[in-house]
Amino acid sequence: MKRKKTAIIIAALLIVASAGIYFYYGFLFKEARNIESEVPDFNIPATKLLDDYNADPKKADLLYLNKTIEITGTVTKQTDSVVILENTVFCLFTQKVKDKITSNKVTVKGKCIGYDELFQEVKIDQCTINK
């Protein structure tokens, strides 16, 4: 009788552990997206992106948030890993970009992470320069 209870407890623990592992890897743990290889959902000018957020932030979030987008605009500020387009779109790169930008007008691909009301900028993450 004691052996049977022990077997049932061990089987129950194995089932719970298996369910936990399945839940973790199936639902919680996701690989990071490779934005560089994704096809963009939108290709828009930097000024239009900001206009959309200024007109209706909730609607713009539904359109652009967590989507891969290509933004075209004039570089107004640049550091090692940040490029600002048209003073309105903040593009954060995963690598240094100083040598990669050869002209003032560029097309940047990245993931939209939303609108920053404090700086009045649209934030783009995981950016790459499209040639």
Image: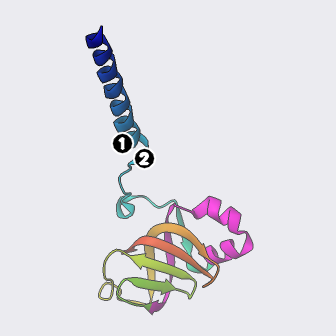
Q: Which residues are magenta?
A: 48-77
**In this view, which residue lies farthest toward the right?**
55
Query: Which quarter of the figure is the C terminus placed in?
Result: bottom left
Which secondary structure lies at badge 1? helix
Rendering colour mode? rainbow
The kind of residue on which mark 1 rests is Tyr
Query: Which quarter of the figure is the N terminus placed in?
Result: top left
**Position in image of residue 46 (x %, y %):** 56, 78
How far, Cα to Cα, is label 1 from label 2? 6 Å
The kind of residue on which mark 2 rests is Leu
Which secondary structure lies at badge 2? helix
The answer to which quarter of the image holds residue 92 is bottom left
The answer to which quarter of the image holds residue 56 is bottom right
- Which residue corresponds to the image point at 36% horizontal and 35% vertical from the top-left? 22
**Position in image of residue 23 (x %, y %):** 41, 38
Number of marks in picture? 2
Q: Which residue is mark 2?
A: 28
Marks 1/2 in contact by CB < 8 Å: the verdict is yes
Q: Which residue is mark 1?
A: 25
Judge the density around disc 2: few (<14), some (14-19), many (≥20) Cα neighbours within 10 Å.
few
- 63 drawn magenta: yes
- Which residue corresponds to the image point at 44% horizontal and 82% vertical from the top-left? 106
- 131 drawn magenta: no
- Which residue corresponds to the image point at 63% horizontal and 83% vertical from the top-left? 118
**Position in image of residue 102 (x %, y %):** 35, 88
**Position in image of residue 10 (x %, y %):** 29, 23
**In this view, which residue lies farthest toward the front?**
2
**In this view, which residue lies farthest toward the left?**
3
- Which residue corresponds to the image point at 46% horizontal and 78% vertical from the top-left? 91
Q: Is residue 1 above or below residue 77?
A: above
Q: Answer left or right for 74 relative to 26.
A: right
